[in-house]
Image (spheres, grey):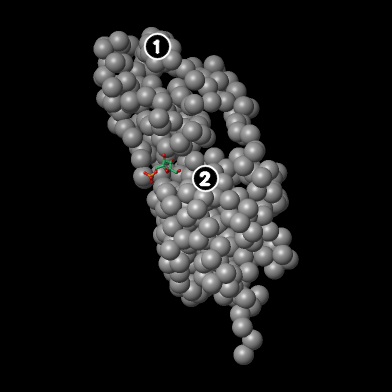
Amino acid sequence: MKKLKRIGVLTSGGDSQGMNACLKTIVSTAERKGYEVVAFLGGYQGLLDNKAKIITSKEAELYFNIGGSFIKAGRSKDFLDAEKRKKAKTVFNKQKLDALIVLGGDGSIRGACDLEKLGLNVLVIPCSIDNDAYCTERAIGFDTAVNNAVNTIDNVQQTMRTNDRILLVEVMGRECGDIALYSGICSESDIIMIPEKKQKEEKIVREILKQLKAGNKSPTVVIAEHQLNVEKFAQKIETETGNECRSIVVGYIQRGGAPTMQDRLLAIRMGVAAVENVIDGNFGYVISLTQDHITLKSLSEAINAGKQFREELWDTFLELKRFKTVKPHKKV
Ligand code: F6P
């Protein structure tokens, strides 16, 4: 019997919704083309430890529309050590792999670059709720995470408005302000704090006071994580404004749940493209989205890609804010 060719896969870093849809697509496409798929469990650490199992489309299809990764994800300290990393090549050869497909964000792309330097045939599919893989217009998981953030903000705003309370919302994103920017605009929030447009706390307080004076009794501030302590900032706002202020941290809710149509579609398109490129022998690339087309970016191009901040979206937000008229209730 002819021996099947083999593709390795792993999901690395923070998981994102759509990873499972992408895995299902990779496995079913690969099976149709005469490959079997070996999954390394728990990201790069699973590769170093050769913690591997064959996955089939029958198994993968059970998880297609579920968040997380059924082959586990994670960050590996060992993988950052150049000596320990060499083990990846031994495992790759031992498993007789033709290629390895890595699903992950910014850090995972850098990891794949290191594997390429060891001579491994590797491809990356960008998956990140933060949208911080700057070689692609959008990473798998971002759309679902933003939708989750918007839904949460919508819900909390309803009770804040009922009680005339100021609301601070912290969202995820690591060094990237995209979740805050997109969710802030789409929830019609009043103020957005992102690392790309640094603003001092004092400026935000002045802005809130302006909003209150104009009749907006419950302004919402969306804050990308790691900039300040939202609980302490809420106390400061209460002291400075004399109004009640509440803070919430959206947290891991952003990273769970069924992937949206946009994330499923991207996962399917990128999964198919990855397998086709394995068959064509194109390695050392990140599968990217460029002007809504699937393209290839070399790994070195990908890690050197500058931050793709959507300046025009920030301008849209400022424009919306300028024309937002706050009408105080009429006295009767
Ligand atoms: O990178 C994805 C992400 O969810 C970030 O937004 C967040 O800062 C981080 O992962 C949380 O990491 P962990 O799952 O290790 O707590």
Q: Position of residue 16 (x, y in %)?
A: 46, 51
Nearest the viewer among 130 and 78 is 78
Judging by the rendered image, the residue that carries numbered circle 1 is 202
- Determine whether label 1 and label 2 are within 8 Å by CB: no
Q: Position of residue 2 (x, y in %)?
A: 64, 86
Q: Quadrant of the N terminus?
A: bottom right
Residue drawn at the location 43% of the way across and 63% of the way down:
49
- Residue 220 is tagged as none
| Residue 119 location, quadrant | bottom right
Identify the amino acid type marked 1.
Glu
Ligand 1 positioned in quadrant: top left
Q: Position of residue 332 (x, y in %)?
A: 31, 12
| Residue 232 falls left or right of residue 80 | left
Judging by the rendered image, the residue that carries numbered circle 2 is 107
Relative vertical location of residue 27 with respect to residue 72 in this rendering, above or below: below
Label 2: which secondary element: helix
Q: For the residues marked 1 and 2, what is the alpha-carbon distance in whole angstroms?
A: 34 Å
| Residue 302 falls left or right of residue 20 | right
Identify the amino acid type marked 2.
Gly
Nearest the viewer among 169 and 54 is 54
Relative vertical location of residue 280 with respect to residue 304 in this rendering, above or below: below
Q: How many marks?
A: 2
Label 1: which secondary element: helix
Relative vertical location of residue 197 with respect to residue 138 in this rendering, above or below: above
- Residue 16 in view of the camera: no
